[in-house]
Image (spheres, coloured by chain):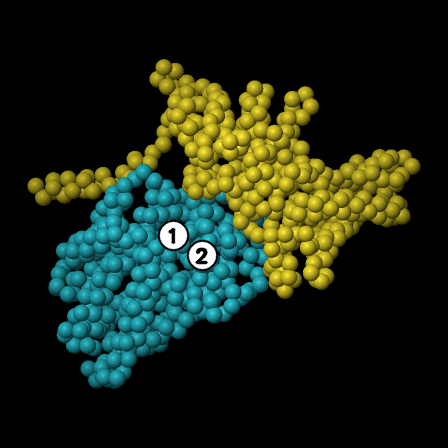
Chain colours: A cyan, B yellow
Amino acid sequence: MKAKTRISQRELFFAVLQSMVGVGILALPYHANKAAGSDGWITVLLLGVSLQVFILVLWLLLRRFPNETIFDLSVSLAGKPIGILLHIAYTFYFLNIVAYIFNITNDILIRWILPETPSLVLLILGTAFFVYACMGSLKNVIALFSFGFLFILILWLIPLLTLAEPVYDVRYILPIASAGWQEIVGGVYYILPAFIGFETMLVYFAFVEKPERFSSLKGAAFALLFVTVFYTLVVLISMIVFSESEMQLIPEPVLYKLRTITLTVFQRWDLVFLTLWTGIVASSAISFGFLGTMGIGKLFRLKRLPASIAAALIVFILASFMYLMIPLPDLGKSLRVISLVFGVILPVLLLAAAVIFKRGGISNAKEK
Amino acid sequence: MRKKSRLFLTLLLSVFLLTGCWDERLLRDVRIVYLSGIDLTEEEFYEINALIRDLNIGESTRGERSVTNILAGATGATLREASLQVDLKLAGTFDSAKGRTVIVGEELAKNNIFKAFDTSFRDPRINISGKVVVTDGRAADLVKHLSEQEPEKAEFFSDLIESSEDATEIPEYNMHLLFSSLLDEGKDFILPFVRVGDRGLVKVDGGAIFKGDQFTGIYTTIRENMLLLLFRERMGKQAVLTSAIEHEAVDSISYKVDRLKTKTDIQQNGEAADVKLTLELGVEVIDYPPADLDEEKQVKKLNQQLSQDLTEQAKAIFEKLAEAESDVLSIGRELMAYHPEIWETIEGDEYYSKINVYPEVRVTIEGGGLII
């Protein structure tokens, strides 16, 4: 089954960007600090650059199977039983990420603004919203993403407010690279979950025009660049505002700092930030949810509405299970493993298999 | 039929959009705290005394509002327990979201100030931009005094502190900055010191020097605070200094700081570090009756006298800080950032005793207002 809708490079940019910027951003400075101390921002930069190289690997894989999403591609590469297994695994992975996003968002909203609202209500609200957002077409979803870009731009400006008061101390990040390169590089694995979303390219890329051209990678590369700069900036700001030992106690440094800023009209900038942030989290949940819905739809040959309802049910069950059974730190740990497996290891294995067994390939495509 | 069931479904789902209702807080149900004082009792219990604004909006008053101030206090093993005890004594919920100032009693300050404030950092509703000040004796007495003497009470107090901050008399400090300094191993701090002065007037009277999370018992004067703040490049809206001079017509001069520049030069000296601090001030004369500033010789003479005066004062302050072993200028942080090899040799709880500070102030008169 070949994809028929086409998206432009700009649309690819919005799709990948919205999938990447999400729940991870609040806790990223905390995790970066935990991984490499005051040099955590180098780790973030390093991960951004290495992912920039890694999307080349994804492209090498995807260009062999033009117009095929990871769901179609795994079947045409690995044959029926294994391919379908991979198809199910990726569907499950995308929905799992949505459930994870729901859980983290619940946790943060309940701790910061809604201490007395039952978690279940937020979850049901999220699920209902999920059905509505995921039953649209790819064009609908991407239109939403390009609108949501506005939120990201505003969100980018708010951390700069923290520099309004002269209470930051550049000396906190000096001397640079004092943690040792081993820790800085080792920290990359630790903060990988904040960058998940780049692997949505495995699906979105199938809709790109002329995938065999190198320039078709532009959208994804710019999205990654944007996220890398954004994240590095946020981490850097957090690190000059808070000392290393202080950061160890504050899981959401940006919010925490915004709480202390009082400008004439607002006393609690953290609430403004959280409001925008919820919108951005919603779009990354929609992105993953849409892909999961697509996976289910393709597997059972369902129309969009029933597929999105099925996906929403799975997400609801997964999220409730996580909420009831798995404590948040463990959830974070498992996410690290899962995102490494589905984002990095599996695509590399698939590429290796494609090269070894000479499946796909541009020459094939041209002959057709 | 289909339309109706759709409408019903939409209405049902929109119920979940009303999540805010769980967390609503009505102004008429809360008792807003503007000012509170915390003490440590002899039994190591925390005592909290709060000035609470009671907003009466009731049916009986037909929408008319009236404001009264209530003084309420209680003790508890933790500060949170103490405030819950206060809550029990009030008609509504004790809400410290708008707290502007917290007064800390001397005993508590000497014990461990971090423990007392821990609860404030955990609750997102507490305003951690609230000011923190230290008083001699018990904070409870000061709160009581304020509630009896001052008509505007809490507002008066926070305005008092803000105007002192603007005049560079006390460091601009709040709970959040307190938290930062407490957790930074290379930094200590001075909290504003407030007491009841002559004729029962409440006044800001310098600062209380802290080492780590404990008050050392040593106070600074307002003049000393000012000079220290200039060394830290933390000038408020303005800084006015007065120095004694040798002159046939007058014996003192007032001037305000226009620009300032600091330089830190650190050298290793065996097991210790020698720190040379230079503060360059460009000042504008604001009170100096003998009109002889048009003579270059006189200006030079004054520059020299002022520099000498301020340098001597600076030396006295740094002796005081050395006695308190308090690293108010965050030299420890400076060492960590720029001279990690020196930091390694002196690192430890007592590192400030291994730092010798040699301050120098250079004053240049650069103007005189409207006249020369």
The number of discs equals 2
Q: Kindly tell me whether residue A263 is visible in this rendering.
A: no
Quarter location, residue B223: top right
Residue A81 lies, in percent from the top left, at 14, 73
What is the chain identity of the residue bearing mark 2?
A: A
Q: Nearer the viewer, residue B100 or B296?
A: B100
Left or right: where does residue B247 sit relative to residue A110? Answer: right
Q: Amino acid at mark 2?
A: Pro
Looking at the image, tell me whether mark 2 or mark 1 is earlier in sequence order: 2
Which residue is the site of mark 1? Answer: A151
What is the chain identity of the residue bearing mark 1?
A: A
Q: Is residue A61 above or below residue B363?
A: below
Q: Amino acid at mark 1?
A: Phe
Residue A16 lies, in percent from the top left, at 33, 63
Residue at 51%, 49% (x, y): give it.
A162
Q: Is residue A315 above or below residue A187?
A: above
Q: CA distance from mark 2 to mark 1?
A: 20 Å
Q: Callout 1: helix, strand or loop?
A: helix
Which residue is the site of mark 2? Answer: A29
